[in-house]
Amino acid sequence: MASRQQFLLTSQLQHLTALDQQIATLDAEVERRLAPLAETQALIESHPGIGKRTAEPVLSEIGATVAPFRTPEALAKWVGLAPGNHESAGKCLSGRTKATYVGAQYRRMARTKGAKRASVIVAHTLVVDLWDMLYRQ
């Protein structure tokens, strides 16, 4: 019985090690491809609530310029955060927010509109802020 459990644990650890190596390879490739946009990535990451793992897909999807989007609302609509969009990803993320404007906005909106709608409102605010940051550099 113990040898079977040891075999299964060893197998699972090997699988986790392989996944960690694959993640490291993918991280290196993303970093290499986004290297020309390092300055823009740093600008995006300077916004409270946006870190490396959020800035990377933003740059990958919209690029370093928001020229295709004439207004912040156009970008928000493209992202799927236009007013009246009642979709939910169904993910449970940490409810803790930093002491920032968006954190205060979330708490204020959550009291009156509920947590899910407050999350969408805050996400919309972040998208509009990103548009302004990228448009004005």
Image (cartoon, rainbow, N blue to C red):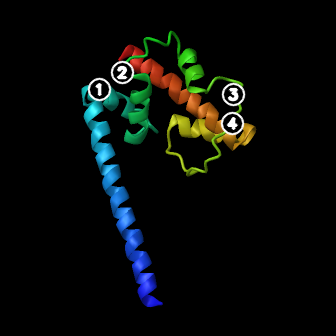
- The residue carrying pointer 2 sits among few (fewer than 14), some (14 to 19) or many (20 or more) residues within 10 Å by Cα, namely many
Q: Name the one closer to the observer, 4 or 123.
A: 4
Between tags 4 and 1, which lies in front?
1
Q: Which residue is mark 1?
A: 37
What amino acid type should be assigned to the residue bearing mark 3?
A: Asn
* Residue 109 shows in the view: no
What amino acid type should be assigned to the residue bearing mark 1?
A: Leu
Q: Earlier in the sequence, mark 1 or mark 2?
A: 1
Q: Which residue is mark 2?
A: 64
Between tags 4 and 2, which lies in front?
2
Q: Is residue 118 left or right of residue 129?
A: right
Q: x and y percent of residue 12 in the render? A: 42, 70
Q: Is residue 25 above or below residue 8?
A: above
Measuring 63% from the left and 31% from the top, which residue is drawn there?
Answer: 121
Q: Name the one closer to the observer, 68 or 108.
A: 68
Q: Earlier in the sequence, mark 1 or mark 3?
A: 1
What amino acid type should be assigned to the residue bearing mark 2?
A: Ala
Q: Earlier in the sequence, mark 4 or mark 2?
A: 2
Q: x and y percent of residue 30 in the render? A: 32, 37
- The residue carrying pointer 3 sits among few (fewer than 14), some (14 to 19) or many (20 or more) residues within 10 Å by Cα, namely few
* Residue 112 shows in the view: yes
Measuring 57% from the left and 32% from the top, which residue is drawn there?
Answer: 123
Q: Which residue is mark 4?
A: 117
Q: CB of mark 4 within 8 Å of CB of mark 1?
A: no
